[in-house]
Image (cartoon, helix red, strand yellow):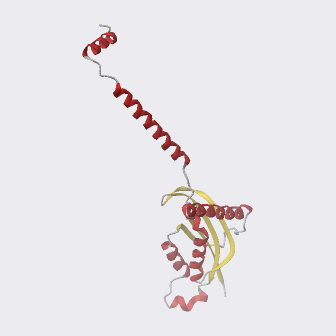
Amino acid sequence: MYMIEYELLYLVAESKEIDLARIREEVKAIVEGEGGIYSSAEKLEKRKLAYAIKREIRGTYIAQRFTTPDKNDREASVEAGDPSIIGLINRKLTLYRDVLRFIVVRAEGLPSLTPEEGTSKVVAEVAKEAQAKKAAIEKKTVRKPKVEAVSEAMKAESVKETASAEKKEEKAPATEAELDKQLEEVLHI
């Protein structure tokens, strides 16, 4: 039995990093559900995107390899009218909302996906950030001290303005003679 190796590269939005482990498992389930066999090699990289995709400007690229049976080994099912495995994977990944973009290519001329030093660090960093975000959401301890300080300062200022307005009201209104005298002094008439 001859197997063809493919590489799947997909992009997950930064806002979905909390669910990155779940998304990776679901993408793996999509590929394996169509007859693909995953290899253990995987490459993860967090990057800023060249342009915004669905209002996201940062994301995590994940590259994984998988193999499928050769077309000749699947002749019976292909002749029966079944679409290709890659076509089915493409269709399902297109409908999967948590993946912003993806591409499936034959891995014949591509360099191997040997894990680099940084890859394990990136995986650990992404997992740590996701746990911190989940904890913050669950505890609802995300505070904005600057906003609170500004609102307190605005309240204090409005109290001062109210007090100064009350003092101005306490003054007796000026008479016409006083106003004329003040105008003469200002205009030097």
Position above or below: 34 against 123: below
Left or right of 172? Residue 80 is: right
Left or right of 158? Residue 36 is: right
Please tell me which residue is depicted at 66% across the width and 73% down the height of the picture. 108
Left or right of 184? Residue 164 is: right
The x and y percentages for residue 173 are 29, 22
The x and y percentages for residue 181 are 29, 11
Please tell me which residue is depicted at 30% across the width and 13% down the height of the picture. 183
Position above or below: 148 against 131: above
Q: Quadrant where the C terminus lies?
A: top left
- Near-viewer residue (134 or 75): 134
The x and y percentages for residue 1 are 67, 88
Task: State whether residue 118 appears in this view.
Answer: yes
Q: Residue furthest top?
A: 189
Position above or below: 10 against 153: below
Q: Which quarter of the picture shows residue 42?
A: bottom right
- Near-viewer residue (115 or 148): 148
Task: State whether residue 13 appears in this view.
Answer: no
